[in-house]
């Protein structure tokens, strides 16, 4: 691997957006809301699509308790500080609250608890997806390393030279079951020499624990 990474040309510029989606235990299921074992509980994210740095709203109904808090597991600010629990307000029998926006793209599980220190409530898995526009339309793969190989193929006439997993930075607290980071080295067209190799960090994601892997982003720095 060449010691310096240089910015390589990415053939298609992708506008950035926040996309919010629900993911159940299997990728085939994509309900409009997630339910707890009790059919009375209903949890929703509103609206389904947000821009970067906008904040999601959580709406919970069917909970007859004195208080309710929500947070995004693994979500942090730009300094790596975990986003805190947020108290929801009871409005006409429905709990509502607007949560802080995660600083990074990725998949974040919505977690609920009744009060500070209480055990999180057992609900169906509800995920907040922070993605570039079109991410869910990209090719999917059974193995995350195949995402990195596919990305190199999107660089015109590039040749993959090396690929290996890369340790995640300390500030990255995203769920390791849903995110994988790789570093790739590749040769640009007509430049096979070692000194001309380029490098890129490629992050793969999946929007559920049994879902397939897709490209989250490719960056010069991890």
Image: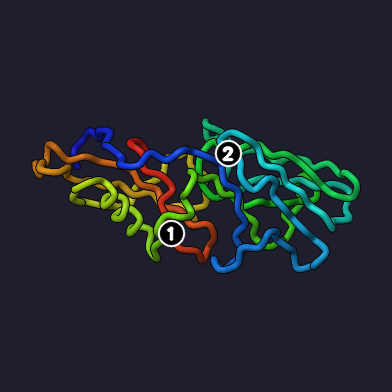
Question: In the picture provided, is 55 more to the left or to the right than 222?
Answer: right
Q: Which mark is residue 213?
A: 1
Quadrant placement of the N terminus: top left
Nearest the viewer among 71 and 208 is 208
Query: Dot 2 surroundings within 10 Å: few (below 14), some, or many (20 or more)?
Result: many
Q: Which mark is residue 114?
A: none
Mark 1 residue element: loop
Residue 137, x across and y down, in percent: 46, 55
Residue 79 higher or lower than 65, as above or below: above
Residue that appears at 29% across and 55% down:
149
Mark 2 residue element: loop
Discs 1, 2 touching: Cβ within 8 Å: no
Query: Dot 1 surroundings within 10 Å: few (below 14), some, or many (20 or more)?
Result: many
Q: Which residue is mark 2?
A: 102
Nearest the viewer among 217 and 73 is 217
Residue that appears at 50% across and 42% down:
105
Residue 5 higher or lower than 34, as above or below: above
Residue 1 higher or lower than 43, as above or below: above
Residue 180, x across and y down, in percent: 41, 52
């Amino acid at each position: 691997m060449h010691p310096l990474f240089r910015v390589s040309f990415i053939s298609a510029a992708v506008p950035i957006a926040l996309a919010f989606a629900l993911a159940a235990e299997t990728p085939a299921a994509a309900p409009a809301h997630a339910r707890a074992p009790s059919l009375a509980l209903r949890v929703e994210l509103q609206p389904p699509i947000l821009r970067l740095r906008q904040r999601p709203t959580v709406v919970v109904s069917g909970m007859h308790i004195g208080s309710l808090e929500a947070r995004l597991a693994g979500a942090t600010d730009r300094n790596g500080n975990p986003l805190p629990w947020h108290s929801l307000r009871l409005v006409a029998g429905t709990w509502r609250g607007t949560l802080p926006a995660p600083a990074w793209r990725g998949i974040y599980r919505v977690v609920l608890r009744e009060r500070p220190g209480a055990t999180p409530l057992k609900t169906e898995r509800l995920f907040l997806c922070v993605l570039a526009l079109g991410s869910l339309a990209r090719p999917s793969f059974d193995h995350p390393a195949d995402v990195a190989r596919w990305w190199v193929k999107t660089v015109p006439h590039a040749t993959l030279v090396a690929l290996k997993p890369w340790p995640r930075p300390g500030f990255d607290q995203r769920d390791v079951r849903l995110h994988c980071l790789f570093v790739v080295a590749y040769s640009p067209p007509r430049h096979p020499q070692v000194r001309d190799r380029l490098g890129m960090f490629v992050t793969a994601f999946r929007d559920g624990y049994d879902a397939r892997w897709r490209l989250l982003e490719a960056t010069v720095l991890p």
